[in-house]
Image (cartoon, rainbow, N blue to C red):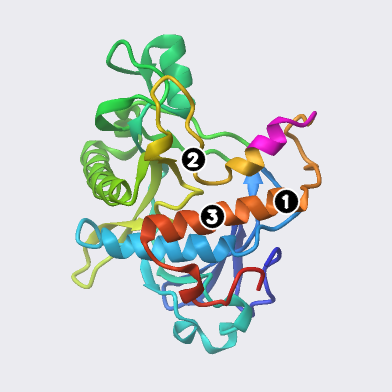
């Protein structure tokens, strides 16, 4: 599913992976495609069943952390959609959700020093401008998970890592504290579940937003996708060795291929070999099945390649 189907609902937004529709009555329809991006460039070739993996994994984690914080998910069942949107090609890749007013920051939690956090620490000894323990090496586990928010960049720009103090300036003290509390609680729960399956959750990002309640107040909830390979850095525990870079259990086959090319990481993207697409599809499927303990074949939408 490389292109969105002709869904007869108002189309609100096309992201790198998802398409967003107005489903009426204060609801949104999120449709996960098989598109894949790397270095902020969307590839021309879809990765079979990637959208189903992202949807299935999000649904799993929304349920797993539902007692920690509420979420926007209403249903992943086609029968719950407006009648005109119940298209067979959407099975397994839709989320009918409550519309939320999203916080203007990404809520990132880090349990290990990796990615941009490692680069900053290596250069300046800080993480998101905050003091960090001395003597850490790449992929080291932090003494405690830390909340490291970022701004949400405009299209074509990159998110900017910010300190918690800057998040307070943007959100206000009470909201920033609540966002940090919720994000850390979700991360700790997910880390325990992932480690039981043989994986380390190095870092992840959450989207939080406000929804109205029946008594007229506002509730802060978890939204968008959650704890998928697209939003999280999972490592095999057996592959982890501080001081080296563990293989990410996500789109790593794609990244490795692209890094070996003479490509400036700007559109247009290079053509992907079939074996790279297939290896990436296997990695996504395996991430869902091993971390969530379920077979993707049991999730709606059919077998690989449909």
The magenta segment:
256-262
Q: Is residue 16 visible?
A: no
Q: Quadrant of residue 122?
A: top left
User: Which comes before the other along the chain, label 2 or label 3?
Assistant: 2
71 versus 165 height, above or below: below
- Distance Cα–Cα, label 2 vs label 3: 26 Å
Q: Secondary structure at mark 1?
A: helix
Mark 3 Cα shell of 10 Å, populated few (<14), some (14-19), many (≥20): many
Residue 223, how many percent across, how many down? 38, 58
Q: Which mark is residue 275?
A: 1
Q: Quadrant of residue 156?
A: top right
302 versus 3 height, above or below: below
Residue positioned 18% across, 70% down in the render:
215
Residue positioned 70% across, 48% down in the render:
276
Residue named by callout 3? 284
Q: Quadrant of residue 121?
A: top left
Indicate the quadrant containing the C terminus: top left, top right, bottom left or bottom right: bottom right
Residue 120, how many percent across, how many down? 45, 18
Residue 14, how many percent across, how many down? 63, 58
Q: Residue 38 or 21: which is nearer the viewer?
A: 38
Q: Outermost residue, front direction?
A: 238
User: Which comes before the other along the chain, label 2 or label 1?
Assistant: 2
Residue positioned 57% across, 77% down in the render:
302
Q: Secondary structure at mark 2?
A: loop
Indicate the quadrant containing the N terminus: top left, top right, bottom left or bottom right: bottom right
Residue named by callout 2? 152
Residue 286, how many percent across, how many down? 49, 56
Mark 2 Cα shell of 10 Å, populated few (<14), some (14-19), many (≥20): some
Mark 1 Cα shell of 10 Å, populated few (<14), some (14-19), many (≥20): few
């Amino acid at each position: 599913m490389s292109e969105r189907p002709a869904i007869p609902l108002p189309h609100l937004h096309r992201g790198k992976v998802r398409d967003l529709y107005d489903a009426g009555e204060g609801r949104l329809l999120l449709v996960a495609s098989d598109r894949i991006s790397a270095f902020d460039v969307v590839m021309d070739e879809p990765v079979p069943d990637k959208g189903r993996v992202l949807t299935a994994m999000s649904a799993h984690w929304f349920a797993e952390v539902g007692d920690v914080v509420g979420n926007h998910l209403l249903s992943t069942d086609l029968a719950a959609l407006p009648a005109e949107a119940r298209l067979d090609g959407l099975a397994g890749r839709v989320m009918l959700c409550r519309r939320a007013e999203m916080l203007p920051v990404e809520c990132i939690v880090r349990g290990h020093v990796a990615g941009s956090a490692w680069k900053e620490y290596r250069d300046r000894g800080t993480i998101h401008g905050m003091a960090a323990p001395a003597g850490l090496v790449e992929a080291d586990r932090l003494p405690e998970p830390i909340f490291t928010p970022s701004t949400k960049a405009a299209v074509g720009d990159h998110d900017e890592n910010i300190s918690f103090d800057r998040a307070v300036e943007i959100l206000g003290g009470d909201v920033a504290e609540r966002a940090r509390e919720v994000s850390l609680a979700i991360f700790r729960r997910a880390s325990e579940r992932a480690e039981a399956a043989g994986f380390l959750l190095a870092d992840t990002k959450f989207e939080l937003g406000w929804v109205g309640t029946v008594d007229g107040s506002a509730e802060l909830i978890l939204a968008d996708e959650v704890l998928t390979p697209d939003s999280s850095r999972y490592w095999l525990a057996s592959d982890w060795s501080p001081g080296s870079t563990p293989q990410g259990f996500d789109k790593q086959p794609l990244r490795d291929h692209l890094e070996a090319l003479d490509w400036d990481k700007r559109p247009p993207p290079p053509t992907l070999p079939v074996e790279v697409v297939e290896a990436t599809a296997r990695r996504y499927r395996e991430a869902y099945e091993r971390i969530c303990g379920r077979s993707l074949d049991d999730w709606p939408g059919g077998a690989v390649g449909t």
